[in-house]
Amino acid sequence: MKIGFLGLGNMGGPMAHNLLKAGHELTVFDLSAAAVANLVEAGASAAPSIAALAGSDVEMIITMLPAAQHVKGVYLGEDGLLAKVAPEVRLIDSSTIDPMSAREVATAAAAKGNRMIDAPVSGGTGGAAAGTLTFMVGGEQADFDAALPVLQAMGKNIVYCGPSGNGQVAKVANNMLLGISMIGAAEAMNLGVSLGMDPKVLAGIINTSSGRCWSTDTYNPYPGVLDNAPASRGYTGGFGTDLMLKDLGLATEAAKQARQPVVLGALAQQLYQTFSGQGNGGLDFSAIIKMYNGAIE
Ligand code: NAD
């Protein structure tokens, strides 16, 4: 397929590489010349602007941008995608943004005659490189079906979540729970170790008992428990505190709009905000355990 790809960062870059590997023809655009050059070297064509990409003969355009303001700018701006793109071009936004913004952009696309789905991902940069991302898709079932073969070149689990915006709803709910559960895991691990338990033994008990969760068995925040978790390499790599903070902001904002309480989600947001404000925004989010124990390196 002829695909346009816009936003070639930590996630979009490797995703675009996987589309090329699967045999798709790519036209790319990013504000970073280096990011574009990297894809051109692998066989993609570069578009000189968003408008040029929108006006090229692509059948589908995928965007992978930082936040809602970028997505709105790229789609709705004067020289944006919707101003130039032909109505038969399918649109997929894989950025993580709030569900209301996703619905606003999809509605504007529909008004121009374009089919659009939201398809945020989980799986991190490792999943993007390996082509094993999970895609959570909101939109019409027929548009999900049409996008499926393309998404399969970048991901392993592709899940239809319901109408427009529901991909973002699933993503926001999952990541809020992840942020909360990581704080719970940090609190419990730190308590147990402070009371004299060996961290590995404690994690082993939790992971075969009712406290087990992804934050304890796959991504344990205590150093040395899991060799390949960020906790065992000084909290480098992984999923940054500031990215978690962004997702918790989306969750609390969405909750406000839905008039639903997210008591622990809001508390988690405040904890990560405090931690980020102390200069730790670039550390993996499991480093939140340092809020409990400043001696952890
Ligand atoms: P990133 O900052 O590395 O990449 C974003 C890219 O978009 C950059 O290359 C930037 O130059 C480009 N960009 C920004 N504005 C643009 C514009 N107007 N026109 C063209 N290009 C523009 O971000 P990322 O880590 O790749 O994340 C992208 C999205 O995926 C975010 O919404 C993030 O929340 C989500 N996400 C990230 C991860 C992760 O682990 N990094 C995991 C899941 C989801």
Image: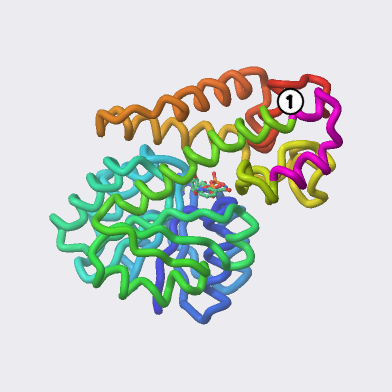
Q: Position of residue 31 (x, y in %)?
A: 49, 48
Q: Classify the position of the C terminus by image quarter.
A: top right
Up-down: is 8 above or below 15? Answer: above
Q: Could one spot residue 50 in this view of the protein?
A: yes
Q: Residue at horizontal 57%, vertical 77%?
A: 21
Residue 227 lies, in percent from the top left, at 82, 50
At which x and y percent is residue 121?
47, 55
> Does the magenta segment cover residue 202?
yes
Predominant SS along the magenta part = helix
Task: Write the start and end of the magenta stretch as one range.
Answer: 190-206
Residues 137 and 147: in front is: 137
| In the displayed structure image, the side of residue 76 where residue 120 appears, left or right | right
Residue drawn 44% across the image and 61% down it: 135
Amino acid on which the number 1 mark rests in the picture: Leu
Placement of 155 over or under 98, stated as above or below: below
Left or right: 47 as drawn, with respect to 260:
right
* Left/right of residue 145 with respect to residue 279 in the rendered view: left
40 and 71: which is toward the camera: 71
- Residue at mark 1: 191
Mark 1 secondary-structure assignment: helix
Q: Is residue 206 left or right of residue 148?
A: right
Q: Residue at x 78, y 39 (%)?
A: 202
Dividing the picture into quadrants, the one containing residue 14 is: bottom right
Instruction: Indicate yes or no whether the magenta region holds residue 244.
Output: no
